[in-house]
Amino acid sequence: MSEIIASPSTRRIALEQGVDITARARELGRTTIGPEDVGARTAPARTPSADTSRYWDVDHAQFGPVTTEKVSRFAQVAAANMAAAQALVPAVTHHDRADVTVIEELRRAWKPEAQARGLKLTALVFHVAALARCLRAHPRFNASLSADGQTLILKDYVHIGIAVDTPHGLMVPVIRNADQKGLWQIAAEIADLASRAQARKITPDQMGGASMTITNLGGIGGTAFSPIVNPPEVAILGITRTETITVWDGDTPRPVPMVPLDLSYDHRVINGADAARFMVNYCALIAAPRNMLV
């Protein structure tokens, strides 16, 4: 059987209850295990009211040919988490954009060195480095709210989650202590973690515990979106495809490559002014990436 996917908390519960995760997965015929599979008490799913669910319970075949596809256990768990987050977190999305002229110049200039190292220096590498520095400068973004909403837990570490689109669902491996790593090391870790995610070889210690997540659609397209905050994180950064924007220097138009940025945040912890200041700092780092090399 492939590597068993289970969160650190699930593995802890299994250990406490003497449950063999591998055997349990084999028994269930799955490679993903949740806390409910090892006997943990979980809150019962909220059943939609009859008036609501009747609109969902439709025989679609009456309108034409259909096929069915089983939703994987992994996708079901992710969907439940996202639905809960969307329902419980009062999220706001701040939209901005940053000049990537210098980043693109550096990527071209350093391409030979990247090839010599066997690496690809993507724009995402610079975003991870910039986000790590902003999380140090803005501690409320590097925090989590306790389950009862009474305590803010400020973290003295910076771990960046990278959302990876895989055939078996969205996975979020984590770059640990990103603020202590240079661009080349970040590039190597992104490539390694993305490859492991695609091959379903991510281990529990390579997921969970992120300070904040980046979800990058730049390689696909789009101009903006509103990513869902992934609790217990209090913010998430979305990136879409770079576009050329006309910037005016006095009376002279100048084409500038700009990357659209979408910061969704938990309004219980972060207010609009906090988000605006965070993005001003972030955009300044992206526009002048050499400041991240100091």
Image: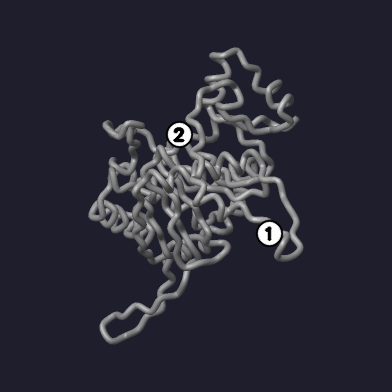
| 149 left or right of 37 in image | left
Colour basis? one colour
Q: Amino acid at mark 2?
A: Gly
Question: At numbered mark 1, what does the secondary structure look like: helix, strand or loop?
Answer: helix
Q: Where residue 242 sits: x, y (%)?
A: 48, 67
Q: Residues within 10 Å of mark 2 (few under 14, many from 20)?
A: some
Residue at 42 percent across and 52 percent down: it is: 237
Nearer to the camera, 267 or 281: 267
Nearer to the camera, 192 or 213: 213
| 65 left or right of 49 in image | right
Question: At numbered mark 2, what does the secondary structure look like: helix, strand or loop?
Answer: loop
Q: Residues within 10 Å of mark 1 (few under 14, many from 20)?
A: few
Residue at 28 percent across and 47 percent down: it is: 270
Nearer to the camera, 130 or 171: 171
**Chain-order first, disc 2 or disc 1:** 1
Q: Amino acid at mark 1?
A: His
Residue that carries the numbered disc 1 in the rendered image: 60
Quadrant position of residue 145: top left
* Dot in front, 2 or 1: 1
Q: Where residue 106 sits: x, y (%)?
A: 47, 61
Q: Is residue 58 above or below residue 234?
A: below
Task: Return the mark for residue 209.
Answer: 2
Q: Distance between the Cα atoms at labels 2 and 1?
A: 41 Å
| 161 left or right of 264 in image | right
Q: Is residue 189 visible?
A: no
- Return the residue found at the far front: 51
Q: Where residue 148 sits: x, y (%)?
A: 32, 31
Q: Is residue 99 above or below residue 148?
A: below
Q: Is residue 169 above or below residue 104?
A: above
